[in-house]
Image (cartoon, rainbow, N blue to C red):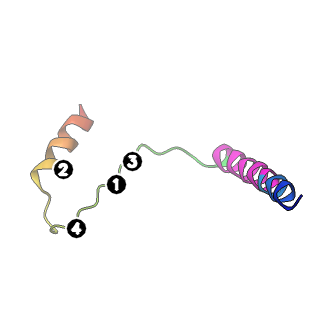
Amino acid sequence: MKNFILKIILHIAKAFMQIIYFFIKIFTKQHNKITMLSRQSNNINIDFKMLKEEIEQ
């Protein structure tokens, strides 16, 4: 019985989160942006330069 109640609570929580996500998707704008992070250095490495060139095409 305890397991059954827990499953019901989880389904309700999942539905609630899906409703929240639905409204977030409706009211937010899509931006064509990419963020590239690197821990190696502050300079742009060759991989990022190559990715940038391919994305710009």
State the extent of the magenta-drawn residues as a range. Answer: 11-26
For marks 3 and 2, give the CA distance. 14 Å
Q: CA distance from mark 3 to mark 1?
A: 7 Å
Report which residue position mark 3 lands on.
Answer: 33
Amino acid under label 4?
Arg
Secondary structure of the residue carrying numbered label 2? helix
Residues tagged 3 and 1 counted as in contact (Cβ below 8 A)? yes
Mark 3 Cα within 10 Å, few/some/many (few <14, many 20+)? few
Position of residue 22 relative to residue 45, above or below, is above
Give me the residue at 12% from left, 56% from top: 45
Image quadrant containing the C terminus: top left
The mark nearer the N terminus, 3 or 4, is 3
Q: Secondary structure at mark 4?
A: loop
Residue 32: image location, x then y, percent = 42, 43
Could you say which disc has been placed on residue 39 in the image?
4
Mark 2 and mark 1 residues within 8 Å of each other at the beta carbon: no
Tell me the amino acid under the disc marked 3. Answer: Lys
Q: Residue 54: which quarter of the image?
A: top left
Q: Earlier in the sequence, mark 2 or mark 4?
A: 4
